[in-house]
């Protein structure tokens, strides 16, 4: 582990750093993505480790990629585990390929929309120029 691996964080530290609500962080904890230890009276205070912080960062990155939280958890657990990761990496590649295909499809749709908008702009400009001449 690198420097600062013994650093701990409160729920509000993480909420502030990642611009999340504490409720969102508790939700990720319920999903099993984070495993804080408890301290204080009745174990009311959550104490997050550097590992939790890294897992949260990876969760948010996976969400940005459009992965579901279940997929995110599978992948993050895979990175966390010392087990033979061959089969898991294959699964990750499959998930990534699906998401790439989805994004490429969305991009093609956007490109088609853009082309259509450009066509309309051109036609409107031509009509405007024609109207200006006859005015």
Image (spheres, rainbow, N blue to C red):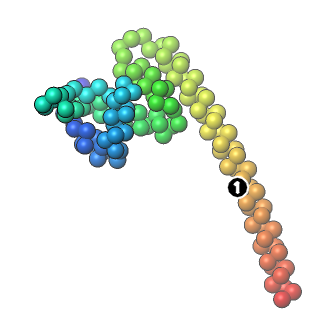
Q: Quadrant of the N terminus?
A: top left
Residue under circle 1?
Answer: 114
Residue 128: where, in percent of width, then height?
Answer: 79, 77
Q: Residue at x 42, y 10 (%)?
A: 84
Residue 5 showing in the rendered view: no
Up the image or down, 6 lies above or below 117; here it is above
Residue 91: where, in percent of width, then height?
Answer: 53, 19
Q: Which of 15 and 80 lies nearest the eye of the viewer?
A: 15
Left or right: 110 as drawn, with respect to 49: right
Q: Residue farthest to the front? A: 42
Q: Residue farthest to the bottom? A: 135
Up the image or down, 90 lies above or below 30; here it is above
Residue 132: where, in percent of width, then height?
Answer: 81, 84
Q: Quadrant of residue 127?
A: bottom right
Q: Residue at x 70, y 50 (%)?
A: 111
Residue 93 showing in the rendered view: yes
């Amino acid at each position: 582990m690198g420097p600062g691996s013994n650093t701990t964080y409160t729920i509000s530290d993480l909420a502030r750093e990642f611009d999340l609500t504490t409720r969102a962080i508790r939700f990720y904890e319920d999903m099993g993505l984070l495993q804080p230890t408890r301290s204080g009276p009745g174990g009311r205070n959550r104490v997050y480790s550097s590992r939790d912080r890294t897992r949260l960062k990876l969760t948010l990155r996976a969400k940005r990629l459009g992965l579901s939280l279940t997929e995110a958890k599978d992948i993050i657990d895979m990175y966390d585990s010392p087990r033979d990761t061959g089969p898991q990496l294959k699964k990750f590649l499959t998930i990534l390929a699906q998401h790439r295909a989805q994004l490429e499809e969305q991009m093609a749709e956007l490109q088609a929309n853009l082309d259509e908008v450009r066509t309309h702009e051109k036609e409107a400009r031509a009509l405007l120029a024609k109207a200006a001449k006859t005015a």
